[in-house]
Amino acid sequence: MENLTPEARMTLTRATMHILDSWQLGVDEMRELLGLEDSVRGRNFQKFRTHQPFPEDPVIDRRAEFVLKIAGALKTTYPVNDKMALRWLRQRNTRLGRPPLALMIQRGENGMLQVLAELDCTYMWELNDTAEAFTKN
């Protein structure tokens, strides 16, 4: 996600905000999930929804990409009922040991990776194949 055009950055920002809003997150939850500075307030999120892209930061870009992938995996898992996806995010998951949303907020990118792997087992296969290809060379 390096070197995004201004248009692509704005598209990423709006899509991510749409998902976070659908997940019914508060400002603090959104800030933590995206890895934004504490100085980012509610009015900044309103700007993100309309006309201001996220700050250029590789951490924020990766986290926004995770949000998009997790939302896609949730849509595949619960194609008919968005409320079930929201419930899955907020209810305790036995394998993860806590609600997936709490895990993502508490553990950042590692938590997001765990949640994505839980939803989409092929994601970890792709990572393992890539890692194996690098170790063989």
Image (tube, rainbow, N blue to C red):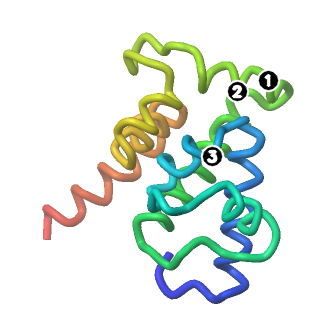
Q: Residue at x 76, y 61 (%)?
A: 46
Q: What's the CA distance linking mark 3 and mark 1?
A: 21 Å
Report the side of 123 relative to 128 (left or right): right
Give the residue displayed 47% in from the left and 34% down from the top: 115
Which residue lies most toward the right here?
Answer: 80
Q: Look at the image and tell me in which quarter the C terminus lies.
A: bottom left
| Disc 2: CA contacts within 10 A as few (<14), some (14-19) or many (>=20) | some
- Secondary element under disc 1, as helix, strand or loop, is helix
Residue linked to disc 1: 83
Please state which of residues 59 and 122 is positioned toward the viewer in this rendering: 59
Q: Position of residue 96 (x, y in %)?
A: 39, 21
Q: Amino acid at mark 2?
A: Leu
Q: Residue 60: image x %, image y %?
A: 48, 64
Q: Are marks 3 and 1 in contact (CB under 8 Å)?
A: no
Q: Which residue is mark 3?
A: 27
Q: Does the residue at mark 1 contact the one at mark 2 (Cβ under 8 Å)?
A: yes
Residue at mark 2: 86
